[in-house]
Amino acid sequence: MGDGVDKLLCGLIGAGIQRSLTPAMQEEEARAQGLRLHYQLIDLDKAGQGVEALPSLLSAAKTMAFAGLNVTFPCKQAVIPLLDELSDEARAMGAVNTVVFREGRTIGHNTDGSGWRWGFERTLPGADLARVALLGAGGAGSAIAHSLCRMKTASLIIVDQDAARAAALAAELNRQYGGQAASGSADAAAALRGATGLVHATPTGMDKLPGLPLPAELLRSDLWVSEIVYFPLETALLKTARALGCRVVDGGTMAVGQAVGAFELFTGHAADAARVDAHFRRLVAARTH
């Protein structure tokens, strides 16, 4: 396609997002497909604003004919009342990470859960979902919990320092998916007893929060381990799990999976997932060296 192609405008609204790899991922995949796409960071911290800026930001994006916006902390819930429509997944999760502008309407989607599932199933096809322990009932944990329920996980134990938050998420999952598969717990040791897999969905292990999210002795070689942290890609949890012989999924797969989903929503074109993944890993390697 030549210069006659309209430029697609997209962006990310959130707080403290200067290190985001999303602009590079989206712009590079568009370039590879012959599309012209500009992806703008809209950092609330830099602007000295909070979620109260969302209505004017959405209105401005609509006026400027944006194709869509990604939305991250602290806006994923706050944006919902401002939208015209929600996808089934966004409604179920009560959170939006992607807003698409279509014919004057704003439609909220969530590609976090589907992005995690894409990476997980691609890396560990046929993994045993008999009893899964999920650490973290926050935004990412909640999105993954919904995906695990949709994947027919037989028993899902949600562990959070805030026991009430874990219990509330479990109750909501059981209500939505019609069963008793989910339960909340404050005890990681009990949750991992007899577990077939572990999903880690807290910030522990990030460059700025190093360390293990649970005692190393709770890990066993027969567990699969899925991580959402990707700075660094090889967290302390993954290092420990690999050393024990666990099958593992790194956090990069979810980052790529949700970006691939958003790209398709923004552009109407399927992303080449392997190409996006290779580009993402080059970006992370450059960032960590």
Image (cartoon, rainbow, N blue to C red):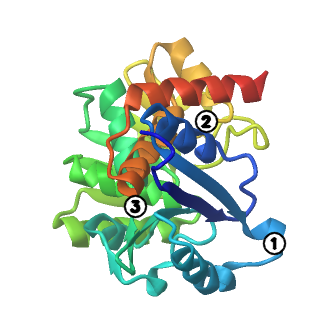
Q: Would you say 114 lies left or right of 199 here? A: left
Does the CB distance between marks 1 and 2 fall below 8 Å? Answer: no
In the image, what residue type sits under mark 1?
Ala
**Residue 171 at least partly seen:** no
Residue 200, numbered label: none
Crowd band around label 2 with a 10 angstrom C-alpha radius: few (<14), some (14–19), many (20+): many
Identify the mark at residue 110; answer none if there is no mark.
3
Q: Dot 1: within a 10 Å radius of its alpha carbon, few (fewer than 14), some, or many (20 or more) residues? A: few
Q: Position of residue 258 (x, y in %)?
A: 44, 47
Query: Against 201, is 216 above or below?
Result: above
Q: Image quarter for residue 257?
A: top left
Secondary structure of the residue carrying numbered label 3: loop
**What SS does tag 2 mark?**
loop
**Dot 1 corresponds to which residue?**
47
Relative to 40, is 2 above or below? above
Quick check: 217 above or below 108? above
* Distance in Å between CA atoms under marks 1 and 2: 26 Å
- Type of amino acid at the residue the image marks with label 3: Asn
Q: Viewer-proximal residue, 251 or 102?
A: 102
SS class, disc 1: helix
Of discs 1 and 2, which sits in the foreground?
1
Q: Are marks 3 and 2 in contact (CB under 8 Å)?
A: no
Which residue does the image show at 40% across and 73% down from the upper left? 94
Marks 3 and 1, how far apart in space?
Answer: 25 Å
Left or right? Give the position of 123 relative to 281. Answer: left
User: What residue is shown with label 2?
Assistant: 230
**First of labels 3, 1 by sequence position:** 1
Sooner in the amino-acid sequence: mark 3 or mark 2: 3
Q: Nearer the viewer, residue 87 or 247?
A: 87
Q: Where is residue 288? Give x, y as percent.
A: 75, 26
Q: Quadrant of the N terminus?
A: top left
The quadrant of the picture occupied by the C terminus is: top right
